[in-house]
Amino acid sequence: MKSRYRLSTLPLRALALGCCLGVGVATGLAGCGDRTTDVEHVQRAREHQTKQEWQASVIELKNALQKNPENRDARLLLGQIYVETGNGAPAEKELQRAQELGAERDAWLLPLARSYLLQGQNQKVLELTPEESDAPATQATLRALHGLAQLALGQPDAAKTSLDQALELQPNDPDALLGLSQLALVNRNYSEAEALASKASEQDPRDLRPWFIKVRLHRLQNDDPATLKALQHILKLQPENAAALLERAQILIAQGKQDEALADVEAVRKRQPNQPEANYLRGSILFQRKELTAAQDALLQVLKVAPDHPGSQFLLGSINYEQGNLGLAEQYLMSFVSRLPGYLPARLLLAAAQLKLEKPGQAIDTLTPALAQSPEDAQLLALLGSAYLQ
């Protein structure tokens, strides 16, 4: 079974469907009077799988495992579906259990490697080594997955070797083509990156990963129309893909299309109300609309999940400054500046808050490092002058 996630945004790809496939499906487990066997549940799950009805498939497999926890086929298929939908940790658990129950190596090997990639456990991918008994196609894909792991580990030369070896064994291996496409993208060989992504897409038109590479490629070239076209293709294949919806929302925000952007953000939040990027974008839109209290609520939701999220800290600093909560504004902005010291607007706003708090010395300390970067900035010089006069 081919995987349809993309390496470059593994954590964001996992958002697309994973919210539907957690423990909540337990509510759909079979009742006392259900006489369906575990084998029949697995067969139903396969039927749903062919239609990409992931949640229904998972429910059937959970039912099967409730009746027979040692059903190897159910564990194996559940692990494969978790990989397919970007849920690395539960996939690893089910695939390892299937292995313990005697599943054939060629059934669990590649999905397990993919589950490690999804979790960023790249060294574990490299520990899964090819064996002579493995089919050439399996060896090729495993070599390609090694290459993807090496790319993630910042080892481009080793990655190139692994990816080339994969293509020697299987000339059109999609994972190898995607890895080489990403390598070309890193090296800013944009035409080569796009050609390799297109070739990978030909191997499996339903695979989203080549299209996400094209999204990244067009974004690097500041080509919004081409980016939106690629995102539209992804959303045609998978309308609820969170990564694509949030990427499109960012572009729409930059284009001033706040209503359209908010619709994409809310489509993600409907399924994942605590998703940090969705709440951050919601907060950004509401901040632009001057709906400060609602924006603040959205951004505080981000910090509950990602306490050091810099964008949220900057906006919360701005909101509290506008509201006159200068102490809180200073707190958020100092945290932001410590992480992104080169962002001048944050330094200027922090210094303005410190001046209002009658802390001229701290304002001078905040502003002085920016002189080397922006020695003629009028607002910087004016704030420094005010600080020295105070």
Image (tube, rainbow, N blue to C red):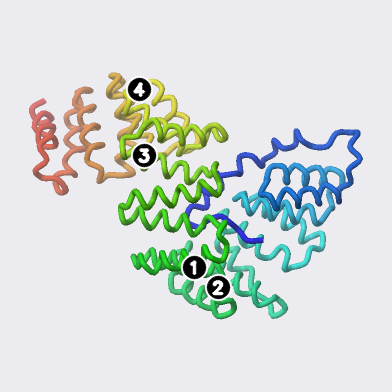
Image coordinates for residue 216, horizontal then vertical, percent: 40, 55
| Element on which disc 4 rests | helix
**What residue did someone put label 2 on?**
172
Q: Nearer the viewer, mark 4 or mark 1?
A: 1
In the rendered structure, are the residues bearing label 1 and label 2 in contact, judged by CB atoms less than 8 Å apart? yes
Task: Say whether disc 2 or disc 3 marks the residue closer to the N-terminus.
Answer: 2
Using the image, determine if residue 210 lies above or below residue 317.
below
Using the image, determine if residue 269 lies above or below residue 61.
above
Which residue is located at x 35 percent, y 22 percent?
A: 292
| Element on which disc 1 rests | helix
**Mark 3 burial class by Cα count in 10 Å: few <14, some 14-19, many 20+:** some
The quadrant holding residue 362 is top left
Image coordinates for residue 241, horizontal then vertical, percent: 53, 44
**What residue did someone put label 3 on?**
252
Which residue is located at x 16 percent, y 35 percent?
A: 364
Cα separation, mark 3 vs mark 1, equals 29 Å
Left or right of residue 16: residue 249: left
Image coordinates for residue 224, horizontal then vertical, percent: 34, 49
Task: Say whether disc 4 or disc 1 marks the residue closer to the N-terminus.
Answer: 1
Q: Nearer the viewer, residue 18 or 257?
A: 257
For the residue marked with disc 4, what is the amino acid?
A: Leu
| Element on which disc 2 rests | loop
**Mark 1 burial class by Cα count in 10 Å: few <14, some 14-19, many 20+:** some
**Mark 4 burial class by Cα count in 10 Å: few <14, some 14-19, many 20+:** many
**What residue did someone put label 1 on?**
199
**What residue did someone put label 4 on?**
292
| Element on which disc 3 rests | helix
